[in-house]
Amino acid sequence: MSWDDAVASSIVNEYKHLAGATLPILHALQENFGYVDKRAVPLIADALNMSKAEIFGAITFYHDFRHEPAGQTVVKLCRAEACQSMGCESLVAHLKDAHGVEINATTPDGRLTVETVYCLGNCALGPAALIDGELVGRVDQDLLDAVCTGKSHDRMAG
Amino acid sequence: MSTSIKIYVPRDAAALSVGANRVATAIANEAKKRGQAVEIIRNGSRGMLWLEPLVEVETAKGRVAFGPVTPKDVASLFDANFLNTGAHPLNLGLTEEIPFFKNQERLTFARVGVIDPLSLDDYIAHGGFAGLKKAVTMTGASIVQEVADSGLRGRGGAGFPTGIKWKTVLGAEADQKYIVCNADEGDSGTFADRMLMEGDPFTLIEGMAIAGVAVGATKGFIYLRSEYPHAYQTLLEAIRTARAARWLGPAIGGSNYAFDLEVRLGAGAYICGEETSLLESLEGKRAIVRAKPPLPALKGLFGKPTIVNNVMSLATIPWIMANGAKAYADFGMGRSRGTLPIQLAGNIKQGGLIEKAFGVSLREIIDVYGGGTHSGRSFRAVQVGGPLGAYFPESLLDTPMDYEAMAAKKGLLGHGGMVVFDDTVDLAQQARFAFEFCAKESCGKCTPCRIGATRGVETMDKVIAGDTSKLALIDDLCHLMTDASLCAMGGLTPVPVMSAMTHFPDDFNRAPKRMAAE
């Protein structure tokens, strides 16, 4: 859903009683809106009695928090050492060469976001990716082709 | 009515990543179609990850394994009468007789893959809560002494004696103390924490409760990385279940002790594996590393005395309490006592989790357990201990997995992860990546790490382009980062770089082929 200050405020209020509530609030906002809008900064600062600088600082420190909405499909592709040893960098090149999909960006049509992630804990079955929250091992070009073209694949879903 | 046959299909994320849910569904559908009564139990993984999805059928002789199973295999498994151990190409025999599994010493992982991770009854039937029941009858000091006597050292990587940390917190006076579990398992090539949290979460809860009883802490936090959504769901449900059964709450296990805990998600910052940065993050701030002293044991979370321990350390405590410090210390070598859950990963044929007593050689793990590279090409390097660990060549593979023995070869054991590379790897690129990773993940507090890592990437680019005169600069920079960084992030980034330069000098001496040809 698109950003709504009233909804955001109610989410902030739901979590503000927690000790060290900043991250739980930011996760809940991103879960709901798909990103954390800059309008969240004063809301959270007020609720937690922290400065806006502290909240802005926290949002920008952590890689997870997006500053704008992601594409409809989000692929988090692991590029850490174990997946490097299984050729994850050739998959990054394939995305660009075959589909014009850049890593750490959303496609202009808003359909696909591919992000770098360092380790999904699936290091014996690499290359690994988290595709819309589903962990996939032994990722290959064929699977990425299906994701890029919006086709179903027998190794996805379920 | 015939009794239903028990079938185990893992719910471990690695098994799911290769289709375990689809296999479980296919088995349920096929059984229904054939009128076979089956009970499908979603267990943790046995750790033989190349065989996932590994399906097990319970028999009078023990569980029989089939794997790797795809949904397409399910009909043929029923045709072959696999429920009565019929012959089938995927039949691997008794799970516990498979050499990879049989030759391990599973203490911390004793229940993982065996039980239903979310069944308290199953947990208790397999010895669960024996450690906590014993702990609540002991004084805090005697629990801490038991942990100290076991020789347990922090499994997160630093190897600091757990008993000493606990003793410091026990001795601290405060109105509130905390137990914090570091579940920010960010090292590439490691997944032991994840497998344990998904496969036997009550063990971690029990370990944290024992820590609380020992030092007088009533509140715990599990700081879990956000890249582990499956472990998160499992932990949430396990905590709810434990609370409902009063293993958490105001009177744990019917004792006079109170202990409760919460799971908190990280947000994709590798630095949060460093304990003081983790505490800052839990407090809701940017995860900037704190200078020590004060130690977290005295001034930790919200300024209160805090035990910060890795998942593996805390999950081993119940075994030590139930079986005694001596039984644990009987495993291992030198000053590395007990067992190490080793994670074999990367370009390896048979990757997975291998819990062994300290002292096993790298070669035995790679050759005997791993069976060589996945690609079938020759072995070239193994990085042990995560992104801050050394790259070792073939000639160092006889090094035993022991904190001191690894340090003597200028490497580290870390969290026990091993990432294998075949002969296509370029160690100059890996050295560059070590700097790049540090530049991306540095918290930015200290200059050697924040600036040094960026200068390292730039300088490595020049080396890779053929300017080998810059290698002296890399060497200099590595010494500076080692000596002057505030924490292990900047302080250990030189380990992969220097080991790559020392053991694989040819990769750093490649003038571009084009230049050579001219």
Image (tube, coloured by chain):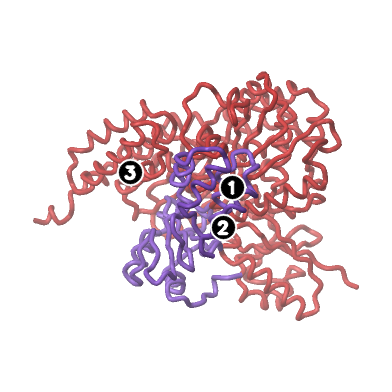
Chain colours: A purple, B red
Q: What chain does mark 1 sit on?
A: A
Q: Could you say where residue B70 lies in the image, as x and y percent from the top left?
A: 60, 71
**In this picture, residue A61 sits left or right of residue B327:** left
The answer to whether the residues at label 3 and label 2 have Cβ atoms under 8 Å apart is no
Tell me whether marks 1 and 3 sit on the same chain: no
Q: Residue A31, labelled with which disc?
A: 2
Q: Tell me which label, 2 or 1, sits earlier in the chain.
A: 1
User: How far apart are the two marked residues, 1 and 3, measured between alpha carbons?
Assistant: 36 Å
Q: Residue B272: where, in percent of width, then height? A: 50, 40
Label 1 SS? helix
Label 3 belongs to which residue?
Answer: B431
Residue B50's spot in the image, x, y percent?
A: 55, 59
Please name the residue shown 66% across and 21% down the image: B167
B204 vs B69: above or below = above
Using residue B136 as the reference point, say whether residue B464 is left or right of it.
left
Tell me the subunit letter for badge 3: B
